[in-house]
């Protein structure tokens, strides 16, 4: 029963996303509007910034480059058909799900944490630094491994993933406590269950004891990193830079300050975009990380007002619609 | 080493010295490690800035109690990374670039440009989150057993 429910919600949130495309374009307009370029001419994208460095520093242990080379590759999220992008839920299952949600009056904001934070947002974080031997890297992965010259290892992938997860945590904290906490929990749960499976399947770890040790280690890295990044976010850029250096760059001595600056810029820009999103949009999974080769420009007051107006109009209309499916309902605010 | 490189490195060392001291003692420090790296290039005496000072027993205990495997690395690996002194070829231009980037970081360019405001810094779900964290780090207001239990039960 529960599974049907989860699925119903997932399928409906997918179908809902088509008319929302227009909105996403608007949200994206926030960092591609030409008018704002004047005020920040010297800003370049984090990637351009990192590439212009003339310091030819290499990671010390370059021989320690160990791209993940799995014997058997795991499916990106899971083998379950319900998590595949092409699967369409049969209509009767969808209807049954809606009936269950309506009759038990389920809190969809709470239920949605699984498919949105546990599946969609985890997938976002995971793919940022994903790398396999003999496979081309994604744009973001190229930024991290080639421009910032980070070693291509599994634990480096983990560091990149938790940096992105922390960025999402910052926004989740600003949701109502009950929901934000649940989103964080789902994201972390999914991270560790996925890492465990990856250790066995892709990193050829055979012993459960050793896998447990790794997991404990990753757990303490996550706690330390979240703590250090939080301190950096709240205080200043030099603290954030030091936190990034200790965690993402592994505290290596021959770090390039230009790279550090580019990363600080990358992180601050993502958080800025998140700060402009309402709870409702974020909780519905409308966020995507800005690619490092794009530059985020500040919104003018007018653009921001216009964007908020559009969001408000869209969700007001949605809430007023009597035919809105029970699974698409949400009580989260859309005007903050 | 040419005088241009040395001059640039002196500037860089001065900039690195402006980095604020860390609020907590960590296994490695950005400021110390970079001073150690660039002071020889600038022709200055390395290690004069307390980088050779031994951590106190209290600090060691503190670090150990916070993490089992610092940075998730094996202790030997961490030592190896720290000890390896790569022979780097610096140019004056590259070092000036480093100084410029560091100045951008020090002037909080990005924090101010991408200001997020109270929406994220006093998050609705947990408004005191960051303030409590900072109070704890700076030792202004330590968590007691009861406040800790409250966090465990209520989650905030």
Image (cartoon, coloured by chain):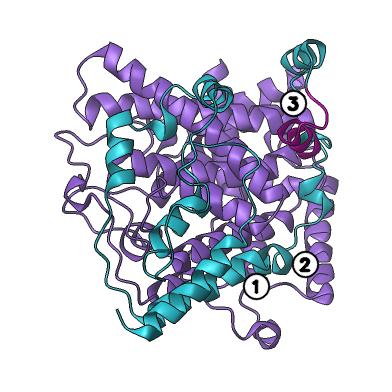
Chain colours: A purple, B cyan
For image coordinates 22% across by 31% down, the residue present is A203
Q: Are marks 3 and 1 on the same chain?
A: yes
- Closer to viewer: mark 3 or mark 1: 1
Q: Nearer the viewer's eye, disc 3 or disc 2?
A: 2
Q: Residue beneath label 3, please? A: A107
> Visible in this render: residue A89?
yes
**Residue matched to label 2:** A307
Same chain assignment for discs 2 and 1 = yes
Which residue is at the front of the view, A242 or B117? A242
- The reply to the same-chain question for discs 3 and 2 is yes
The chain under label 2 reads A
Can residue A19 be seen from the camera position used here?
no
Q: Earlier in the sequence, mark 2 or mark 1?
A: 1
Residues shaded magenta: B130-142
Dominant secondary structure of the magenta stretch? Answer: helix
| Label 3 CA crowd tier, 10 Å (few <14, some 14–19, many 20+) | some
Instruction: Provide the residue designation for mark 1.
Output: A29
Q: Secondary structure at mark 1?
A: helix
Q: Is residue A275 above or below residue A67?
A: below
Image height check: is B64 above or below A334?
above
- Relative placement, left or right, of B17 versus A330 is left
Please give left or right for residue B119 compared with residue A6 in the image: right
């Amino acid at each position: 029963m529960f599974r049907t429910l989860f699925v119903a919600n997932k399928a409906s949130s997918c179908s809902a996303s088509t008319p929302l495309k227009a909105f996403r374009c608007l949200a994206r307009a926030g960092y591609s509007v030409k008018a704002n370029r004047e005020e920040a001419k010297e800003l370049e994208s984090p990637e351009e910034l990192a590439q212009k460095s003339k310091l030819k520093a290499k990671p010390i242990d370059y021989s320690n480059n160990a791209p993940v080379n799995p014997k058997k590759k795991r499916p990106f999220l899971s083998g379950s058909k319900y998590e595949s992008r092409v699967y369409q839920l049969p209509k009767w299952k969808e209807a049954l799900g809606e009936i269950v949600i309506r009759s038990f009056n389920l809190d969809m904001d709470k239920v949605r944490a699984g498919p949105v934070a546990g599946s969609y947002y985890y997938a976002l974080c995971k793919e940022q630094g994903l790398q396999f031997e003999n496979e081309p890297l994604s744009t973001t992965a190229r930024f991290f491994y080639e421009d910032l010259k980070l070693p291509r290892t599994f634990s480096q992938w983990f560091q990149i993933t938790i940096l992105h997860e922390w960025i999402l945590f910052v926004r989740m904290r600003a949701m109502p406590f009950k929901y934000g906490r649940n989103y964080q929990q789902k994201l972390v749960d999914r991270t560790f269950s996925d890492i465990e499976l990856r250790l066995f399947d892709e990193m050829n770890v055979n012993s459960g004891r050793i896998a447990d040790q790794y997991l404990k280690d990753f757990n303490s890295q996550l706690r330390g990193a979240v703590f250090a990044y939080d301190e950096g976010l709240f205080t200043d850029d030099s603290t954030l830079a030091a936190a990034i250096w200790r965690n993402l760059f592994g505290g290596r001595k021959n770090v390039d300050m230009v790279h550090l600056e580019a990363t600080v810029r990358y992180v601050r820009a993502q958080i800025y975009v998140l700060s402009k999103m309402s709870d409702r949009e974020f909780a519905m999974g409308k966020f995507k990380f800005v690619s490092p080769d794009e530059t985020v420009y500040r919104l003018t007051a007018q653009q921001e007002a216009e964007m908020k107006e559009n969001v408000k109009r869209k969700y007001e209309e949605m809430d007023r619609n009597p035919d809105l499916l029970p699974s698409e309902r949400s009580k989260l605010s859309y005007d903050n | 080493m040419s005088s241009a490189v040395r001059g640039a490195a002196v500037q860089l060392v001065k900039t690195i010295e402006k980095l604020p001291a860390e609020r907590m003692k960590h296994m490695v420090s950005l400021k110390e490690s970079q001073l150690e790296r660039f002071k020889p290039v600038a022709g200055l005496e390395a290690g004069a800035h307390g980088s050779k000072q031994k951590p106190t027993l209290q600090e060691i205990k503190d670090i150990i109690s916070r993490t089992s495997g610092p940075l998730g690395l094996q202790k030997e690996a961490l030592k190896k990374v720290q000890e390896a002194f790569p022979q780097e070829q610096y140019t004056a231009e590259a070092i000036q670039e480093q100084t410029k980037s560091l100045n951008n970081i020090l002037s909080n360019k990005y924090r101010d440009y991408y200001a997020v405001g109270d929406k994220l810094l006093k998050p609705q779900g947990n408004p005191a989150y960051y303030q409590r964290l900072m109070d704890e780090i700076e030792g202004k207001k330590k968590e007691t057993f009861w406040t800790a239990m409250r966090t465990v039960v209520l989650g905030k």
